[in-house]
Image (cartoon, rainbow, N blue to C red):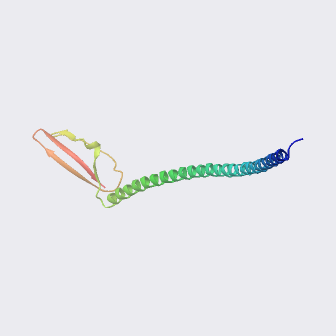
């Protein structure tokens, strides 16, 4: 038979082996639990991230829509300012006409020429009430007339 010290040594080795197996079994179970917990946390974080990406995309689309609305409103304001400027110019023109401060030359500013000792007729209808200024320049052979209509 085997000596008593060998039996004790084998018993201690068996106890150590059982302890190691138990330790690695518990550690393995603990590691598996940790792994499962990490997988669950990862799924939760991925769901959270997906929700935030969706929210980000919606926010960016809303921002783009709002920027387009701002650009459209700015364009409308620019057009209105241009129209206001045009209306203001028209008001000033009409005030000048009303106050008889506006003048223009009939016939596109061309001179109306008649030979000396001749008679000529010239007719045109003004657009507004006002008065006519006639400038005459005469030489020995020609007479030049420029008609200004002040309205």
* Residue 132, x across and y down, in percent: 26, 53
* Residue 118, x across and y down, in percent: 18, 39
Which quadrant does the C terminus fall into? bottom left
> Of 91 and 97, which appears nearest the observer?
91
Residue that appears at 83% across and 48% down: 8
Which quadrant does the N terminus fall into? top right
Q: Residue furthest bottom?
A: 99
Q: With respect to residue 142, does 96 lie above or below? A: below
* Residue 10, x across and y down, in percent: 82, 45
Res 97 quadrant in image: bottom left
- Does residue 62 appear left or right of residue 110 in this picture? right
* Residue 59, x across and y down, in percent: 60, 52
Residue that appears at 36% across and 57% down: 94
Residue that appears at 60% across and 49% down: 61
- Does residue 96 appear left or right of residue 143 in this picture? right
- Does residue 147 appear left or right of residue 27 in this picture? left
> Of 53 and 150, which appears nearest the observer?
53
> Of 48 and 120, which appears nearest the observer?
48
- Does residue 39 appear left or right of residue 56 in this picture? right
């Amino acid at each position: 038979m085997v000596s008593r010290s060998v039996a004790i040594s084998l018993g201690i080795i068996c106890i150590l082996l059982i302890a190691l197996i138990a330790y690695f079994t518990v550690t393995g179970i603990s590691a598996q639990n940790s792994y499962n917990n990490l997988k669950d946390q990862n799924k939760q974080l991925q769901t959270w991230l997906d929700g935030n990406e969706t929210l980000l995309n919606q926010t960016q689309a809303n921002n783009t829509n709002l920027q387009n609305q701002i650009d459209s409103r700015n364009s409308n304001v620019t057009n209105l300012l241009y129209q206001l400027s045009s209306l203001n110019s028209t008001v000033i023109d009409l005030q000048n006409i009303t106050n008889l401060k506006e003048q223009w030359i009939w016939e596109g500013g061309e001179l109306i020429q008649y030979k000396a000792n001749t008679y000529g007729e010239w007719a045109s209808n003004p657009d507004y009430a006002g008065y006519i200024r006639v400038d005459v320049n005469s030489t020995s052979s020609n007479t030049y007339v420029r008609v200004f209509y002040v309205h």
